[in-house]
Image (cartoon, rainbow, N blue to C red):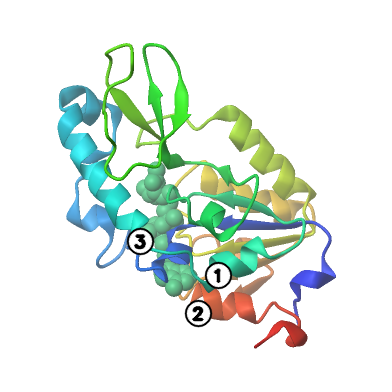
Amino acid sequence: MIRLGDFRRVVFFTGAGLSAESGIPTYRGSGGIWEKYDYEEYACQRAFDRDPEKVWDFHDERRRFVAARDPNEGHRIIAATPGATVVTQNIDGLHQRAGSKGVLELHGSLWRVRCARCRTVAENLEAPIRSRRCGCGSHLRPDIVWFEDMLDPATVRAAGDAIARCDLLVSVGTSGVVYPAADLPRLALSRGAVAVEINPEETPLSPLHTHCLRGGASEALRTLLPPAALP
Ligand code: OAD
């Protein structure tokens, strides 16, 4: 029986399946975002250079949609795990809204913008955003790691360090097909950590885990709590 409280250095590695229970569609599979929208039109630098307003319309709609949704029990269990590190591929900010601190956002954030000209990066929680332009006149762009973008090296390093040092890795709701993020769980296994995958389906990452819990995120995370913590 795996219990979160039996480990000193816990890392949660999360993906879109965790936020699915908040009503936010995942990216892949039926009803997934990339089934409805072509990333080449909405989620790459080339699309933004071609038509920034169209790309912003898509992201403003996502801002509105996500702002109207709340963190779920899975986010709250993660936030309540003392000393845990959260490494997420999610850009929705729901970990932070549930109370997690120091979240390592591998794919950036829907709630930050940056300016390519003056190199500023700023938090912006407006939904929709009031101005799509920086003070310097240039278009702001969402600070999201789009297709073909590089991940922030410092964030990847911090995530890798935390996973290499952890004694328990819990991967929640990721298809494990997007690299380099999908390489990270391997570090835990190679250092002998206990690694739990939570996903209703088998994934390419399943063999990198010592335990697989097949089910929804909140329900499976609840089984990792001490019995006294259950309502
Ligand atoms: P995916 O959409 O690729 O995968 C979602 C995973 O969640 C699948 O394996 C589902 O089986 C699982 N799932 C669905 N419902 C679940 C539930 N209730 N509980 C637990 N798991 C559930 O999402 P990611 O792996 O996060 O990039 O995708 C990785 C990256 O691809 C994303 O960060 C995104 C996308 O392009 C950016 O936004 C930059």
For label 2, being within 8 Å of ligand 1 is answered yes
Q: Quadrant of ligand 1?
A: bottom left
> Tag on residue 74?
1
Q: Is 73 left or right of 126, judged from the image as shown? A: right
Q: Which residue is painted at 48% across and 43% down in the image? A: 179
* Label located before the other in sequence (2 or 3): 3
Q: Which residue is painted at 30% across and 65% down in the image? A: 29
- Is label 2 in a helix, a strand or a loop? loop
Residue matched to label 3: 26
Question: How far, Cα to Cα, is label 2 from label 1?
Answer: 12 Å
Q: Name the spot of residue 4 as percent of width and height, x first.
A: 75, 70
User: Which image quadrant is residue 50 in?
Assistant: top left
- Marks 1 and 3 close (CB-CB < 8 Å): no
In the foreground, 10 or 202: 10
Q: Name the spot of residue 24 as percent of width and height, x first.
A: 35, 63
Q: Name the spot of residue 62 as percent of width and height, x first.
A: 28, 50
For label 1, being within 8 Å of ligand 1 is answered yes
- Is label 1 in a helix, a strand or a loop? helix
Q: Amino acid at mark 3?
A: Thr
Q: Residues within 10 Å of mark 1 (few under 14, many from 20)?
A: many
Question: How far, Cα to Cα, is label 2 from label 3?
Answer: 15 Å
For label 3, being within 8 Å of ligand 1 is answered yes
Residue matched to label 2: 215
Q: Which residue is painted at 56% across and 60% down in the image? A: 98
Q: Is 6 left or right of 87, judged from the image as shown? A: right
**In this view, 117 is above or below 149:** above
Q: Which residue is painted at 44% across and 16% down in the image? A: 119
Question: How far, Cα to Cα, is label 1 from label 3?
Answer: 15 Å
Q: Name the spot of residue 181 as percent of width and height, x first.
A: 53, 45
- Marks 2 and 1 close (CB-CB < 8 Å): no
